[in-house]
Image (spheres, rainbow, N blue to C red):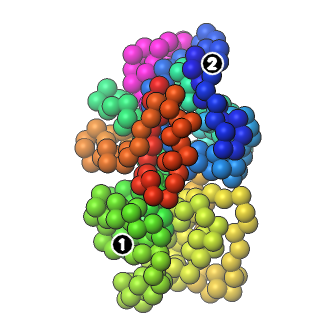
Amino acid sequence: MKTVVLEKPYQFSVGDTAEPSTVGAGEALVRVHQVGICGTDIHAYRGRQPFFSYPRIIGHELGVEVLVVGPNNHGIQAGDRCSVEPYLNCGHCIACRHGKGNCCTNLQVLGVHIDGGMREIIKVPVNKLHRSSALSLDQLAMVETLAIGSHAVDRSMLSAGEYVLVIGAGPIGLSVIQFAKLMGVKLIVTDVNEQRLNFAARQFGIDYAVSGNDQPLERITEITGGDLPTSVFDATGNVESMKNAFQYVAHGGRLTFVGLVQEDITFNDSFFHRREMTVYASRNALPGNFTRIISLMEQGQVNTAPWITHRTSYAGLIESFPHWLEPGSGMIKGVVEF
């Protein structure tokens, strides 16, 4: 079957690999149709993704069709269209026992720790399949990105009417914006990329779009009447941005890191202590996030169609991918088709 492998930083190959073996109990073979490209894939391509080794079949944002299902199928049938929850957890560690399989001590994420979905057919546990007869395969491939933002917003426990700042308007930032907006908050978004900032403003009708290139702290302080936002999300995956994010948090506020970097994040302890901040890490997502998102998409409350700005076949990925990453490409979300 046709397979795309990231052999090492900046080097993809396209070739053939063997199809998966026959399914067992609680497993399914699925045909991969759409693969979304996310920040994790871009960091891996550039050699900057934590928890990653080469060579690797990347791809964890998947829109798939079920081919074969083994016993204990959890109601999944051949022909079902599904989104894949790509977080394979052990089920018995301390995190799993407390309902936090997203940060399982033995976690394996498709396309990161183990080979992912950039191939025609993969085998997955049926309990990681979330089906919808109403959504397109494009939409199903977008569910995992949205789940990251949904989980991050859940972590921060937003309240209607509070000022919320999202730093970074890439796909992960957009997913945070989507679910923060549903909470009825007063939403401020900042980014150094004016094109992405304008996209967020058009797509979501955010309350305040603040350029990251023009003294954003001064403007955000003005917007909030001197209070600063009570909840701040950094979705940049940029170490300097993450260090600077502390300055935007109100006294008694919360800071949620949605992005991930390999470097250390440092901060001034007296500044942090004086404001009695709460800092959250937000890793992956939970099954309930997938269920909720599919329902919202089916109801038309979440529309990801404008997000997909770039598209290629698996055969065209080697040529297309470097151009997608160029600063002027305008990419919000890329999709690879099999």
Q: Which residues are magenta?
A: 60-82
The answer to which of marks 1 and 2 sits earlier in the sequence is 2
x 38%, y 88%: residue: 222
- Position of the N terminus by quadrant: top right
Is residue 296 shown above or below 276?
A: above
x 47%, y 25%: residue: 338
Evaluate whether residue 124 shows in this view. no
Q: Where in the figure is residue 226, as x and y percent of width and height?
A: 42, 90
Q: Where in the figure is residue 131, as x and y percent of width and height?
A: 40, 28
> What label sits on residue 209 in the rendered view?
1
For residue 11, side relative to residue 160 (left or right):
right
x 67%, y 39%: residue: 11
x 36%, y 83%: residue: 223
Q: For the residue carrying disc 1, how many other residues have a C-alpha within 10 Å: few (<14), some (14-19), or many (20+)?
A: many
Q: Amino acid at mark 1?
A: Ala
Evaluate whether residue 119 shows in this view. yes
Front one among 310 and 135: 310
Give the SS element for disc 1.
strand
Q: Amino acid at mark 2?
A: Asp
For residue 95, side relative to residue 33 (left or right):
right
**Tag 2 residue:** 16
Q: Where in the figure is residue 238, as x and y percent of width and height?
A: 61, 64
